[in-house]
Image (tube, rainbow, N blue to C red):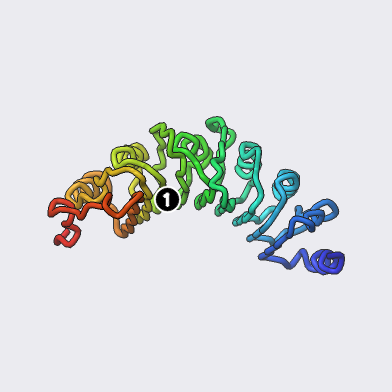
């Protein structure tokens, strides 16, 4: 590790892209090494396995990196306080791309109690990939900091609470959603409330309910024509779980019209 640190110090003025993968026992790297303003050409930083206790101090130092346009975080650790993490991320002065993935083998629901942004807290982020569970209401608070957002990807695993707050993202053109137990009515309202001109929509939903409205091709056609007139690419995956084989009903003619000219 000391040799790696020495090599990085010697070439930090030339580094444009930096990918650092840490094991839990090697997170002491940041206790004696900072990625700061001396990395004056760094544009892309990927951190894998960073410890939640180390991450905030690291982000404070990253606020001094003048050309950091892309930041990718991959971790399997549990974060108690996502609010402070997002506050520090949105304070990064040049950031355009942010991807934050928390491996959730235990299906943990993360709470992101972030207040709505004011005019002095707005971020330059245009691409946001939220790789942890997030309710619609929490999403509304997060994206209030990113008015320039054009690409967004998020996971909605909050199957017991849906607050359909209005999320205004007029610049959004690409949206990817992975959801559990989100009803079609809720999904439609969410898209309508964003007031955006989507060109690309990727949507995956998994449901334990017997609601098969997602298989209504005529409803999809009406929804796309009325609310997504600019849509060019649409990818949809629907999974319904059942306790036994008899629970599955074959779609009737009304739900089997996805081969229409539309």
- Residue occupying the point 41% across, 45% down: 180
Label 1 CA crowd tier, 10 Å (few <14, some 14–19, many 20+): some
Report the label total.
1
- Residue drawn at the location 55% of the way across and 54% of the way down: 97
Q: Mark 1 points at which residue?
A: 178
Left or right, 40 with respect to 126, comes to right
Q: Which of 54 and 213 is in front in this view?
A: 213
Left or right of 132 in this view: 234: left
Question: Is label 1 in a helix, a strand or a loop?
Answer: strand
Q: Position of residue 131 (x, y in %)?
A: 53, 51
Please say if 224 is above or below 233. Answer: above
Name the residue rendered at 20%, 52% in the picture. 217
120 or 254, nearer to the observer = 254
Q: Quadrant of the C terminus?
A: bottom left
Q: Is residue 49 above or below residue 135?
A: below
Quarter where residue 2 is shown: bottom right
At a point 63% along the width and 45% down the height, the residue shown is: 89
* Residue 251 locus on image (x, y percent): 19, 54
Determine whether, in the image, residue 221 is placed left or right of residue 117: left
- In this rendering, is residue 133 above or below 137? below
> Between residues 3 and 108, which one lies in front from this camera angle?
108
| Residue 111 percent across, percent down from the top left | 56, 36
Residue 187 lies, in percent from the top left, at 33, 42
Screen quadrant of the N terminus: bottom right
């Amino acid at each position: 590790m000391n040799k790696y640190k020495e090599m990085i110090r010697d070439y930090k003025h030339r580094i444009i892209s930096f990918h650092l993968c840490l094991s839990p026992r090697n997170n002491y790297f940041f206790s004696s090494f900072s990625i700061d303003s001396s990395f004056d050409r760094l544009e892309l930083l990927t951190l894998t396995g960073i410890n939640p206790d180390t991450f905030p101090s690291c982000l404070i130092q990253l606020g001094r990196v003048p050309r950091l346009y892309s930041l990718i975080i991959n971790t399997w650790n549990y974060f108690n306080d996502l609010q402070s993490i997002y506050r520090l991320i949105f304070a990064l002065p040049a950031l355009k791309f942010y991807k934050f993935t928390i491996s959730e083998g235990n299906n943990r629901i993360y709470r992101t109690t972030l207040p709505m942004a004011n005019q002095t807290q707005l971020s330059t982020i245009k691409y946001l990939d939220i790789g942890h569970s997030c309710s619609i209401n929490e999403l509304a608070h997060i994206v209030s900091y990113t008015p320039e957002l054009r690409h967004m990807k998020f996971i909605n695993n909050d199957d017991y609470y849906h607050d359909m707050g209005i999320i205004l993202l007029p610049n959004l053109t690409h949206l990817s959603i992975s959801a559990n137990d989100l009803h079609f009515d809720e999904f439609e309202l969410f898209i309508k409330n964003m007031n955006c001109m989507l060109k690309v929509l990727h949507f995956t939903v998994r449901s334990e309910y017997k609601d098969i409205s997602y298989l209504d091709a005529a409803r999809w056609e009406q929804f796309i024509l009325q609310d997504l007139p600019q849509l060019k690419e649409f990818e949809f995956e629907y999974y319904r779980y059942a306790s036994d084989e008899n629970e599955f009903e074959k779609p009737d003619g009304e739900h089997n019209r996805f081969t229409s000219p539309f």
